[in-house]
Image (cartoon, coloured by chain):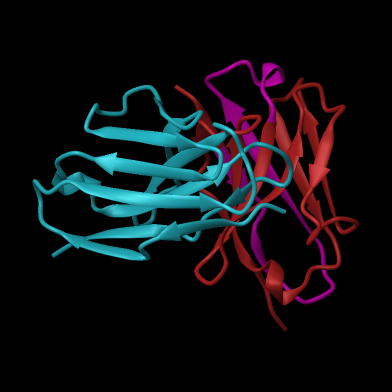
Amino acid sequence: QVQLVESGGGLVKPGGSLRLSCAASGFTFRDYNMNWIRQTPGKGLEWVSFVSDGGDTIYYADSVKGRFTVSRDNAKNLLHLHMNSLRPEDTALYYCARGAGDIDYWGQGTQVTVSS
Amino acid sequence: EIVMTQSPATLSVSPGDGVTLSCRASEYVGSKLAWYQQKPGQAPRLLISDGSTRAAGIPARFSASGSGTEFTLTISSLESEDFAIYYCQHFNNWPLTFGGGTKVEIK
């Protein structure tokens, strides 16, 4: 069955960096577009980034553009999100999610907390 | 970006009742609209895509309609496992955006 398992979250100070990873299994990872989506109690669900199946098309939300970088390793079935210059408003549960529009599978999320 | 507005914020209903949830897009999205269900401590689950197509394994009591800017999700007869938060999301262009959710709670 499809599994998406995120890791790499944690507590980081403002201005710091983190790298999130998502290990995919149960499907042919290289054939699917992927996303990062985050959720907070206050702002709800917010799409963060998209990467196409081959990695050649990438989009970012304006709120993270220039600070976050998405990448994928199709040989290892891994999706990454490199997060720099983190701000308190980046605090959220980050989901790895499969799809090019509608999202048909979600991971369980990894918590990122940005606080001094 | 397209703003998705859901109403009401909360619905208090009894098991067996039918409910209709609304979602409005600030701009035309055609049928590029999905609905998700989220229970506490879980990730969202895809219920409906392309405005009205049930995802795999979703019971027939869930139905949806609409196009353009106005959409609805109907649950014909609520079962205990249906009490949850429901989100709509457009995928007509980037960025993808979600509504604020409708919480369906037990009366």
At horizontal 44% and vertical 43% (from top left) the residue drawn is B71
| Chain A: drawing colour | red
Q: Nearer the viewer, residue A108 or A45?
A: A45
Residue A9, placed above or below residue A113: above
Percent position of residue A14, x then y: 79, 76
Quarter of the image that includes the C terminus of chain B: bottom left
Residue B57, horizontal then vertical, whole percent? 32, 24
Q: Quadrant of residue A53?
A: top right
Give x and y (percent) for residue A65. 86, 55
Q: Is residue A24 left or right of residue A14?
A: left
Q: Colour of chain B?
A: cyan
Q: Residue furthest right?
A: A66
Which one is in front, A87 or B80? B80
In the image, residue A90 sits, relative to residue A52, either above or below, namely below
Res A63 → quadrant: bottom right
Horizontal side of residue B67 vs A94, given as left or right: left
Residue drawn at the location 51% of the way across and 31% of the way down? A104
From which residue to which does the magenta span run? A5-33
Q: Is residue A10 magenta?
A: yes
Q: Give the quarter of the image for residue A79.
A: top right
Between residues A103 and B40, which one lies in front from this camera angle? A103
The quadrant of the image that shows the N terminus of chain B is bottom right
